[in-house]
Image (cartoon, rainbow, N blue to C red):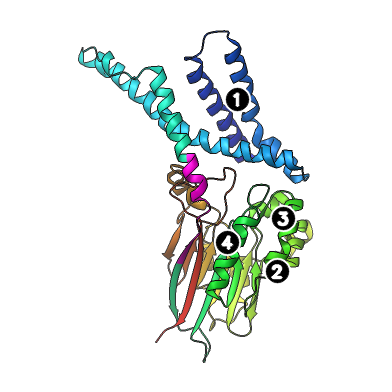
Amino acid sequence: MLIFLVFHGSYALAHLYLFLKARDLLPLNSPLTLLLGLFLFVMAFSPMVIYFYSLRGGGAWTKAFAFFGYTWMGLLILFFFPAVFLDIYNVVVVYGGALIGQNLDAFILPPSLSFFIPLTASACLTLYGFFRARSLELRRISIKTDKLPAGVERIKVAQLSDVHLGIIVGAGLLDKAIKRIREERPDLIVSTGDLIDGGIEYVEPLKDRLRSLEAPLGKFAIIGNHEFYTGIKRSQRFLEEAGFVVLRNEGRVVENTINIVGIDDAESRPSKEEEGHKRSEREILSGLPGDRFTLLLKHKPVVDEEALGLFDLQLSGHTHNGQIFPLNIIVRLFFYPHSSYRELSRGSAIYVSGGIGTAGPPVRLFSPPEIPIIEIRQRG
């Protein structure tokens, strides 16, 4: 709830900031000022409207409004930071000149430039980011281990993370991801959360596409925070019908070849009955054969210190690596690691995927969509 209030409060304030900057260029009490204020008021609350209607399976108008509203969000994010920077520049010029006893008014940017420079830049970057969000990249990670059984030289794992199938992300991006994964011919496919996002009605037609994706050692999935928002029961049913084995705070030995453990996202609050039987990560991991490579699937890149040494590789997502610059700088303050591969202590390691899809704005800037391909090789 706190994150919800902080986000929507900040988003509303960003709209107020934009209105105050634009108002300096418009005549006072003009119809244009009134229309601008009304438009920005509606857009400030659009994420909440989109979210509630998407859960109820709105029609084409809901989808169109969602696309416009979330694209607007991306544009506003990209406008806000350079606009604030230019305002700070003007303040420094004014007060800096006063401190040194010089008139530096000639260096002050007029309101028109301090508004239209960031607006033009944000429009161009939003357009670029829209197309960049559809250019999937493969990320290859190679890990050597002594824990593969005799006769197994390699296990190739494809990680699906943060696809966010729903009102914005649909068949187009999913088909690209499926094609790239099929070309890699992985032995194992895992989804580390947020495969779906919003109303089930938008993703039901995509079930057969996901079901057609196969791997010799199977497909496994966990619950992310957006599956929780969608509804855990509905999300789990969709994942299972799409051919995934859903691991909810449990582990499996797959064909005596590899251990896989799946942990629910922390926001996926268990029922009272589930809470009574909930085990810690350490307990779950301790119950698996220690001589096999252990893959831990956990949506958020949060490492349980007590579980270190009991898993070989944790696969996570959630962060999108910020998705839109400079948000990836902010993400680093909350998550470490926030992206890529890191070795931990006691022989454990973690890989945090930047994800495939987009949450909110259908835009990625300096955070390309990725499909991690992890090759676990026999040491030798």
Instruction: Name the residue that disc number 3 marks.
Output: 203
Graded by Cα atoms within 10 Å as few (under 14), some (14 to 19) or many (20 or more), the crowding at tag 1 reads some
The segment highlighted magenta reads 126-139
Residue at x 42% of width, y 28% of height: 83
Residue 40 is tagged as: 1
Looking at the picture, how far across and down is residue 159, in whole percent? 56, 66
Depth order, front residue of 316/142: 142
Q: Counting residues from the N terminus, which is met first, the one under dot 4 or under dot 1?
A: 1
State how far apart marks 4 and 2 are (Cα): 15 Å
Q: Which of marks 4 and 2 is nearer the N terminus?
A: 4
The residue under label 2 is 211
Badge 4 or badge 3: first in the primary sequence: 4
Query: For the residue marked with disc 1, what is the amino acid?
Result: Leu
1 or 3: tag closer to the N-terminus: 1
**Residue at which label 4 appears:** 176
Left-right relation of 238 to 69: right
**Crowd around label 4: few <14 · some 14–19 · many ≥20 (10 Å):** few
Observer-nearest residue: 123 or 239? 123
Disc 2 residue type (three-letter)? Arg
Compared to 311, does 174 lie above or below? above
Magenta span includes 128: yes
